[in-house]
Image (cartoon, grey):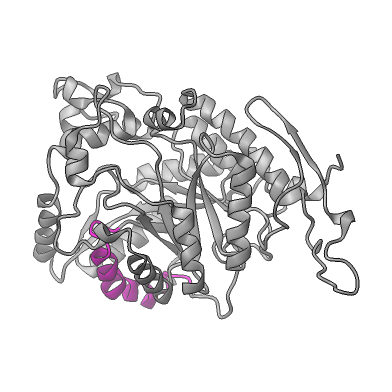
Amino acid sequence: MAKQLRLGLFENAQANDSGTATWRHPDNKRYLFDSLDYWRGTARMVEDAGFDFLFLADAWGWADVAGDRPEICSVEGLDLPRLDPAIILGALIPETSRLGLVATGSTLLEAPYSFARRMATLDILSGGRIGWNVVTTGTADTAVQGFGVPMVGHDERYVMADEFMQVVYKLWEEAWEEGALERDKDGRFADPAKVHRIAHEGTYFRSHGYGNTSRSPQGTPVLFQAGASPAGREFGGKHGEAIFVGSGSVEQLLGHSSAIRDEAEKNGRARTDVKIMSAFAAVVGSTEEEARRKYAEVADAQNPEVTVASYAWFTGLDLSAYAPDTPMSELSTELSQTQVARFADKTVGDVLGDWHAHGVGARPIVGTPEQIADRMIELADGADLDGFLFAPTIPPASTEDFIEHVLPILKDRGAIAPQPEQPQSLRERLIGTSTPALAETHIGSSYRKSLTRV
């Protein structure tokens, strides 16, 4: 039997994602991202198929080239407009019963106190199915303009994020003990001995008082993270429960997964405490020829003018200002360093061509269902992966193709973990804990175990 893998669906509450603009493709329905019907259909489809979670990416910034947002961004709907993913997930709670629901939230731009309440509310209403993708905001250069806050450098954003985590752990794990709510009409609504005042006085954040919500089923939502820089890996090894890595060869992905598990060990956790999930895309055809034709249609749907604006959105770098033979190793940024480092052995011209095809997203595997299933199993076994985050090149058509043609093969081979017979918390289902709470080895659990009375 093959290793049993976990699956998530990557989606985005805007017309395009991953730095591409393929909304003109005849099978693309995401241009209707502001319709609740689109999200209902997507959530029901992947829950019925047995996916473990729906993941909504997010960003606050916009594309900027030499101080201006290029007109092509509006013409092709590259970066704006978008919707708030947390509100979409709230609308999907009654539409689903087993599916995990994951929203991106920024430690640079959110206020910990209000953010903690929002995520706890979702976790309570969903019965413990919420996850948080922790980001420090790679598009910070333009995002801080919108918020009117100072720019913070790349590595310092992770220091700031670590302190953000301290505040929300206190609110989620310490402020209200499990069982504090009694709801006894002949007695008391809540036990005052189990309700605690929290205090935090730090470099970036201050919070004194009581949490606005009682303890949710999971306490802390399942923590997702995707930083590939040294600072990002260190943060992920300390806090992350499910870590996303990009696409690549078996050797490249094994290097990423090993480095992340090393960081987990440094923080007193088992290597298996962190679930590593690789970005994955596929273009499925009944034959290789058909698959290549479909992929060519995807590339044809993309406007070449989008490429420069898109890369600048993620990195702040205007590649049109450099000679095509400029080595990418000579470029640096304080924004998303991952999107520079991944091309360290290439030139500017190489990146412009590569980015046009799939942007920040995974390079798709193009082939027959059997070839795609073979490749997924090969990557999982060779790179020590726990699962995949499937990113449709054309939503939802690519997801439908994967579910109809590839997923049955993976299930027949025993490579997909079965759906639980009874609804579970996202943490139990994805991380494998025996209860919905954080594992005892996780740093966040220390706030629950040693309550501080203030």
- Which residue is found at the position 63% from the left and 56% from the top? 120
Determine the residue located farthest toward the bottom in the rendered image. Answer: 421
> Is 182 contained in the magenta span?
no
Image height check: is 205 above or below 22? above
What is the quadrant of residue 228 in the picture?
A: top left
The answer to whether residue 130 is left or right of residue 183 is left
Q: Nearer the viewer, residue 434 or 62?
A: 62
What is the quadrant of residue 424 in the picture?
A: bottom right
> Is 400 contained in the magenta span?
yes
- Which residue is found at the position 39% from the left and 42% from the top? 59
Q: Is residue 441 visible in the rendered structure shown here? A: no
Q: Nearer the viewer, residue 184 or 242?
A: 184
Determine the residue located farthest toward the front in the rendered image. Answer: 185
What is the quadrant of residue 454 in the picture?
A: top right
Image height check: is 415 above or below 164? below
Residue 329 lies, in percent from the top left, at 29, 23
Q: Main secondary structure of the magenta part?
A: helix
Q: Nearer the viewer, residue 171 or 315?
A: 171
Quarter of the image for the N terminus: give it.
Answer: bottom left
The answer to whether residue 162 is left or right of residue 405 is right
Residue 298 lies, in percent from the top left, at 15, 55
Q: Nearer the viewer, residue 108 or 228?
A: 108
Residue 22 lies, in percent from the top left, at 19, 52
- Which residue is found at the position 37% from the left and 56% from the top? 10
Provide the residue span drawn in magenta: 392-417
Residue 83 lies, in percent from the top left, at 38, 52
The answer to whether residue 436 is left or right of residue 323 is right
Image height check: is 153 above or below 267? above
